[in-house]
Amino acid sequence: MTVQLKGRAEAITIQWIPKYTTLERAAHWLHTATFVPLAITGMILYFPFLQPLAQGPAGMTFRLIHRVAAVIFGLLPIVYFIFQPRRLILNIREFLPNKDDIGWLKGAPAYYLLGRHEAMPPQGRFNAGEKMNGLIMIVAWFVFGLTGVPMWFGKGIIPPELFRWLVVFHDLAMIVSVCMFLVHLYLAVAHPLMWAGLVSMRFGVTSAEYAAEHHAKWYYGPKRAMEIWEAKKREAAQKGGH
Amino acid sequence: MNGKKSSETHLSRREFLGLSALGLGISLAGARSASAAPPAASPYDVAILYDPVKCVGCRACQMACKRWNKLPNESTDPLGIYESPRDLSAITWNIIKLRRTAVGWHFFNYQCQHCTDAACVEVCPTGALSHDPMGFVALDREKCNGCGYCTQFCPYGVPHLQIADILTGAAKSAKCTFCQDRLRSGIGGPSCAEACPVGALTWGKRGDLLEKARARVAELQAQGMNARIYGENEAGGLHRLSILLDEPEQYGLPSVPKTPAFARAWQRIIQPLGNVAFGAALAGILGVFLFVRRKIRMEEVR
């Protein structure tokens, strides 16, 4: 694809490579479209200053919205698992922590705040930040479901002591996942280095150049990625030395 | 370029203070105000006193409660010949049960204990449950959205949900309101106490009732009963005082109602910590946004 950018004389060519399946993108956006209303309708019972919205019929309407959204939110990963189980397992595997995450943590401030690409060692298909987001959302999905379903159907059946703990864990999952969501939203929408993320989630593709830069171990394979990285470092050291 | 760099790439003091204030503001906006602390039980509060030794189990209190509050009949299983219905529910707010204690079988009346330190009021997110200035725990059914927290946090298991639809969650909490409408409009006292023909249930100023209860306990102790007052200090002082002839556990009443401590841990520790996390996340993101916007040029990004 050739793109003519404003203020640039020559057109640039972008080579697109696939990153997400259609189902994955649909699931992601439905997850967003249910997560946001779930968080908002849930916070009505959480923040005392929202008390007027919680009262009477309004409160019952928000509960209904919460429950409708919760059903979709709960079913999404199950639908994904039924239709593309191998993709789901592949993604979860790539979310698991490994040695690259330490390098990411060390390089992250210089990379994200100052835009120093050379500070960031090669990353796989997901970097440590993306893994954290993915894992927190997966864990939160289980916690929301395991605490939410008994709170919905078990009131008066399950022991009150258990119910109280369910409320607390539902709250904790909300606090952690909403904080993660806010960071995720900023990086996806407003951070200049992460421009390709939103493109990938909308169209399912990513730029080859972006992938080589940000996800080298995925693009080149781990061995080749490390070779290129080492070569770059040597080059930079030589330049610095002379 | 170099000369301008410091001012361009670092947050100014004003921006830093603004961000800190934003974070703090979000944290505080979610905090429960200190005024939510329950008032102390006053001797001038209204209260109900129950004396099981005088009770003959006629259930006039139960009937008067149903009639005044327009509560429908409840079908009951035939095993409950002594207790009908078996327990408090969304449509039974006052009930006589049989208990076996140190003195043998006797009647005992159950209703809302109207705590001063009420867990239900503390966890209620709508303000439907509140402390009436007269001292009892009032319920505004218009404000209630049926979340059911009160039913799960009450140490006495008093509030019950009237569930209209389990799927949508349309429901209303229900419990003894101390006949709040009678007291507020000056019609009289709680219908149960006014209906009692033997003076087992009486109502009046809490200070007077405590005095009366102490005298009665001394009388019963002189007769050799292990009598005591329940509700003088429990949960900050109850507005339903009872004379017990045995340990509270024999009546299914907790000797130390513990739930408020849990409700406090949840709403006063976990929720404020959450608010700090939200505040920090938003302020941090905004700070990074302002910083990065100046530092990383889109034209240089591959």
Image: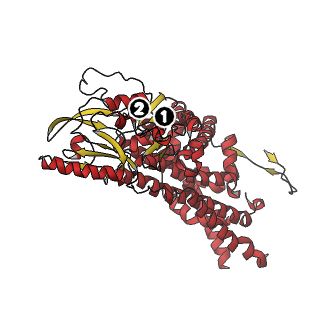
Looking at the rendered structure, the number of numbered marks drawn on it comes to: 2
Q: Nearer the viewer, residue B80 or A235?
A: B80
Q: Could you confirm whether marks 1 and 2 are on the same chain? A: yes
Q: Nearer the viewer, residue B64 or A18?
A: B64
Q: Position of residue B300 (x, y in %)?
A: 75, 62
Q: Position of residue B83 (x, y in %)?
A: 26, 28
Q: Earlier in the sequence, mark 1 or mark 2?
A: 2
In the image, is B245 to the left or to the right of B295?
left
> Which of the numbered marks, if any, corresponds to residue B263?
none
User: Residue B282 is drawn in which quadrant?
Assistant: bottom right
Mark 2, secondary structure of its residue: loop
Q: Residue at x 23, y 26 (%)?
A: B82
User: Which class describes the residues within 10 Å of circle 2: few (<14), some (14-19), or many (20+)?
Assistant: some
- Please name the residue that numbered disc 2 is placed on: B90
Mark 1, secondary structure of its residue: strand
> Which of the numbered marks, if any, corresponds to residue B172?
1
Compared to B84, does A221 lie above or below?
Answer: below
Q: Position of residue A83 (x, y in %)?
A: 54, 30
Q: Residue at x 31, y 37 (%)?
A: B110
Q: Residue at x 35, y 33 (%)?
A: B195
**Can you see residue A118?**
no
In the image, is B136 to the left or to the right of B301?
left
Q: Position of residue B209 (x, y in %)?
A: 31, 49
**Can you see residue A53?**
yes
Q: CA distance from mark 1 to mark 2?
A: 9 Å
Mark 1 is on which residue type?
Lys
Query: Quick one: which residue is furthest to the left in this view?
Result: B224
The reply to whether discs 1 and 2 touch (Cβ–Cβ < 8 Å) is yes
The answer for which chain carries disc 2 is: B
User: Residue A127 is drawn in which quadrant?
Assistant: bottom right
Mark 2 is on which residue type?
Ala
